[in-house]
Image (spheres, rainbow, N blue to C red):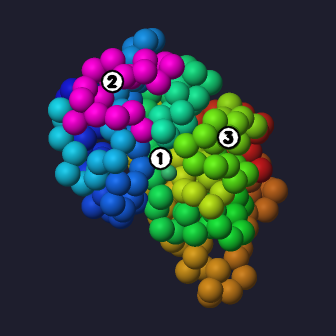
């Protein structure tokens, strides 16, 4: 499947799943060491077509396409420059994850083994004025070891080694945020203890092929 087709498919999914509303969000994929494919500014992700996607360079200049570059392209460029293994970036405003970005970030806790292994720590970047270089600056302390990030009073970002992976990390983050929202109303939240975590980390490489760095661990 072409990169354009794949990116459009996840744009449609992000809109259908209400991870974005109206013109919100931006999704991208690395083409090569000089080009990035990205959604244009002010277009609804639900009706975007392959030809609507634009190509930019690593300084954010438009190379191909007839639309405006989003001011949030800075988030994507920062991620690609900081992490050579990242091939796709998804930025959305999903309801539950964004709600935790404006209250307490109770998502950064060891709850589900699968979430710990696939998303790692869910850090929150301090509030930054949208569209400004403050946003990538706010991501600086976490970018090297995060697969998902909350942006305070803004939304969420996910990174992946493929378009599918970046999208699924966003989907998983929102699903986890939904569960945590319900659990928070039901009663005390049971966290995994140190022994349980240690056992999980011991098998993660062998069973799941996932090697977590110390910063990704609780
Ligand atoms: Zn945003």
Which structural element holds mark 1? strand
Q: Position of residue 112 (x, y in %)?
A: 60, 61
Q: Earlier in the sequence, mark 2 or mark 3?
A: 2
Front one among 218 and 56:
56
> Residue 176 magenta-drawn?
no
Vertical position of residue 67 compared to residue 178: above or below: above
Which structural element holds mark 3? helix
Answer few, some or many: residues within 10 Å of disc 1's Cα (few below 14, many 20 plus, some between 14 and 19).
many
Q: Write down the residue under mark 3.
A: 134
Foreground mark, 1 or 3, reads 3
The Cα atoms of the two marked residues, 1 and 2, are separated by 17 Å
The Cα atoms of the two marked residues, 1 and 3, are separated by 16 Å
What stretch of residues is rendered in magenta? 52-70
Vertical position of residue 95 compared to residue 60: above or below: below
Q: Earlier in the sequence, mark 1 or mark 3?
A: 1
Front one among 133 and 212:
133
* Left or right position of 139 against 131: right
Looking at the image, which residue is at 20% across and 51% down? 47
Answer few, some or many: residues within 10 Å of disc 3's Cα (few below 14, many 20 plus, some between 14 and 19).
some
Q: Write down the residue under mark 1.
A: 91
Q: Respond yes or no on whether mark 1 lies under 8 Å from ligand 1.
A: yes
């Amino acid at each position: 499947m072409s990169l354009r087709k794949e990116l459009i498919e996840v744009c449609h999914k992000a809109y259908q799943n209400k991870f974005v509303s109206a013109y919100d969000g931006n999704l991208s994929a690395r083409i090569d060491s000089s080009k990035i494919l990205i959604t244009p500014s002010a277009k609804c992700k639900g009706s975007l077509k392959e030809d609507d996607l634009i190509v930019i360079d690593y300084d954010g200049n438009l190379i191909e396409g007839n639309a405006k570059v989003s001011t949030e392209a800075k988030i994507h460029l920062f991620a690609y420059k900081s992490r050579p293994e990242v091939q796709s970036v998804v930025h959305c405003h999903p309801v539950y994850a964004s709600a935790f970005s404006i209250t307490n970030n109770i998502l950064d806790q060891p709850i589900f083994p699968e979430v710990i292994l696939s998303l790692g720590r869910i850090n929150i970047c301090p509030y930054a004025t949208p569209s400004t270089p403050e946003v990538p600056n706010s991501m600086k302390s976490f970018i090297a070891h995060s697969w998902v990030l909350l942006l305070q009073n803004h939304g969420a970002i996910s990174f992946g080694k493929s378009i599918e992976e970046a999208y699924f990390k966003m989907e998983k983050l929102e699903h986890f945020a939904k569960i945590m929202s319900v659990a928070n109303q039901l009663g005390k939240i049971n966290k995994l203890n140190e022994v349980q975590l240690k056992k999980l980390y011991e098998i993660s490489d062998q069973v799941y092929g996932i090697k977590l760095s110390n910063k990704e661990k609780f």
